[in-house]
Image (cartoon, coloured by chain):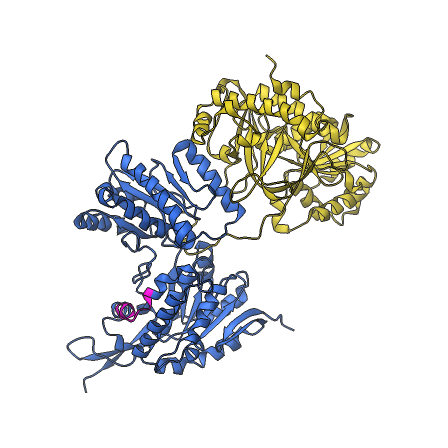
Chain colours: A yellow, B blue
Amino acid sequence: MTEIIDELLKMEPFSLKYLEKKPHFMKCVTESIQFHYANCLDYQNYCKKKNFDPNKIKDISDVPFLPIDIFKKITLLSVPKSEITKIVKSSSTTGNLPSIIHLDKKTVNRQIISLNSIISNFIGKEKLQFIIIDNKKTLETNNDDLSSRNSAIRGMLLFAKKFNCILDENLKLDSEILSELGNIKNSKSCIFGFTWLIHQILSQNENNEKIKEFFSKIPQSFILHIGGWKKLSNLSISKQEFNEKCSNFFNTNSDKIIDVYGMTEQLGIVYPDCKYGNKHVPMFSEILIRNIDSLEIQPDGKSGFIQVISPIPNSYPGTSLITDDIGEILGRDNCLCGRKGTYFIFKKRSEIADPKGCGDTIDI
Amino acid sequence: MGILLTFRNILSDGILYEKDEDNLETSIINLKSKKEWLHSQKINDLLDYFDALGKYWKNNTDENFGSNLKYVSEFLSRKNLVKELKISLRGNISSLDKFVNLFDDNEFSYHAQPRGISVHWIAGNVDVLGIFSVIQALLTKNLCLIKVPNNYSLFKNLILSLKQVSTEKIDGKDLVNCITLIYIDRNDLKNQEILSKNADIRIAWGGEEAVSTILSLKKNFFTEDIIYGPKYSYAILDSEFLKDNLKDSAQKLALDVSIFDQYACNSPHTIFIENDDPNFSIVKKFAKELSNSMESVNRLMLPKSQTSEKKLMEILSLRAEYDFKGEVFASKNMDWTVVYSEDEGLADPCFSRVVFVRPIKNAEDVGKFHNRKIQSIGLGISNLKKQEKIIDSITLSGGDRCPSIGNMSKFHSPWDGIFGMDRMVRWISMGNKK
């Protein structure tokens, strides 16, 4: 049976204005929430505690949200275990648990269609030569149990006619591999990697003329980077600085550097930057900004926690998630790049630090 | 040329500087010059002064002094300080001024001399608690060199206000001269080491990381260490006690939780209710009642301080987790959270007014979760004999103080198992037989 979401996925991702999209999107979200409510008892109980009735959704803001890291603590499934075909784990810092996301075939298919639709809107439909800033072993993990880097790279290979991972096992540039890549000089290419790893490579090779020379022969590549800025927060490098460094090192224009926001907990939905530096919300999702203290919906132009809503997850109730990222909706339908719908930016977190004192025991 | 090490001189010689300087040793030499003056003050005159200071602070609890000052003012009353001194100084407070007899045999007389310079490392979240160690140091006639946290305005205001109080024998302006406030970055280990090497007493209020760093600094052979923190606190009540005291207990514990936003070592994170009802109905009822009190305390008495986005998200995540596996009573915003669950053991602290209510079959079973990191155990037990039995059993492996609920933040000796003022003096004996 075709579900409404499948119809939505056939549409161009940034083709409808916000208000035109709204009724289609609402139907999909309602369908998704009703599905999870009926098929995940834990989620149903959660909704009941929030006095939420899935048959009475008037607006997407009515849908209760789950904090993104709930999948680090609890396994939530809306399909029988036997239907799970892949398990994806988010990256996690030392001492923290990763999110564990269980995917069925239906969810994976939707993710592929969505990702294809969004990314090709930015880099074109023609398949490119991909240069992956990672080691090939990252791709070799067990197919049923994927790390976030693995699944992100695999997702991007949809757009690759060929690909090469150019880091060695210590995640340093492998000059042997680079020297074997002479034949890609005239191909249209895309450099892809995690933001922190690209930054690491840039810092290690700032004065490496041989490598710069290699990239000078493959001009105007797209650079897609994903994974966010949290791992770089200690270095206090601005996005502009990062783009300038990337642009010089990889010999491409800064408007070809695309910072892609996305999360393991809602794979398939990504929010790439347009050339004006705005992140665009596709047809298959919507974002809300919530006040960090009251959690009320913020008006456009005010910052708060980013809530992401997408009907793509089928195997787990990940339709409405609140993230710990701070963002601000800049506008709708009127970005100079021409894409319709909501667009937003990330904002810096406040400088407030949690107190540390005599009650601060590491473990008890 | 050597690299100049800067530190922030906030207050010295009674003058507010708040400027970067480059020679910490000079400030310390200057402070040392006040040693004789402080030593010459009589303990009764100091007690009069601090009693007057307590009254001054009580009448001036405002934005400059913060709302957590109530307990400090009570602590400073002459009656209380005499008790604190007596319990620490073997019953004779005059031992601070002169040689006194402590035993009937008159073989020796004893004098409690100050150790010298007390260096205080004050934790950012509980600056008011740091005031307690400063007062104890001054009462025992030790000079105070205080490393304040970077948000030091409350602490600075409190110390500066000493100048506003004078008694017949002591002018606060003179007493302030015995205190130096400085700020050093936590990573500036060179200056931290200068502090440590000049300390006759090192007093550290802080978390695990901060205290470990302080303890790793070089010190003099005879320096005394007084470590306050890192500690965890909780409360135990029994259902019998709650039958008659449900509302009152909730109110008292809401206060204990809310003071210092739960960042202090004495703030309770878990509340155990001893209960043999399989439905735990009184435990759930108490959790609900506690939530009402948390709201009232936040609204009417102790509004919550600003919280980071990271902590707010942590609270949100914890609420969602227990929406799945327990019951959550929470403010509409992120101000306070009461989590009911039937989990075993001490809950991991979330801080920021998140308190866990858990049933327990036998209160003595909490003992198996005890270690030296346990500090305060708030009590609401129906029967004193039973209470003594529980406390004797569970404190064998940890737990330092067992106040009644509602008094968990009330500073008294011993604290963290230490009679602080006893550790701040050197006992001198003098033979009386000719």
Left or right for A317, reference A206: left
- At a point 48% along the width and 25% down the height, the residue shown is A53
Q: In which quarter of the image is residue A202?
A: top right
Quarter of the rendering occupied by the C terminus of chain B: bottom left
Spot occupied by residue A130 in the image (x, y as percentages of width and height):
74, 31
Number of marks present in the image shown: 0
Spot occupied by residue A301 in the image (x, y as percentages of width and height):
65, 43
Taken as a whole, is the magenta stretch helix, strand or loop? helix
* Residue farthest toward the left in the current orientation of the protein: B105
Quarter of the rendering occupied by the N terminus of chain B: bottom right
Using the image as rendered, state which of residue B121 and residue A60 is in the foreground.
Answer: A60
What is the magenta range?
Answer: B74-83
Residue B136 visible at all:
no
Spot occupied by residue A28 in the image (x, y as percentages of width and height):
59, 22
Using the image as rendered, state which of residue A231 and residue A340 is in the foreground.
Answer: A340
Using the image as rendered, state which of residue A35 and residue B428 is in the foreground.
Answer: A35
Spot occupied by residue A233 in the image (x, y as percentages of width and height):
61, 48
In this picture, is B351 found above or below B98?
Answer: above
**Residue B178 within the segment the image draws in magenta:** no
**Residue B77 within the segment the image draws in magenta:** yes
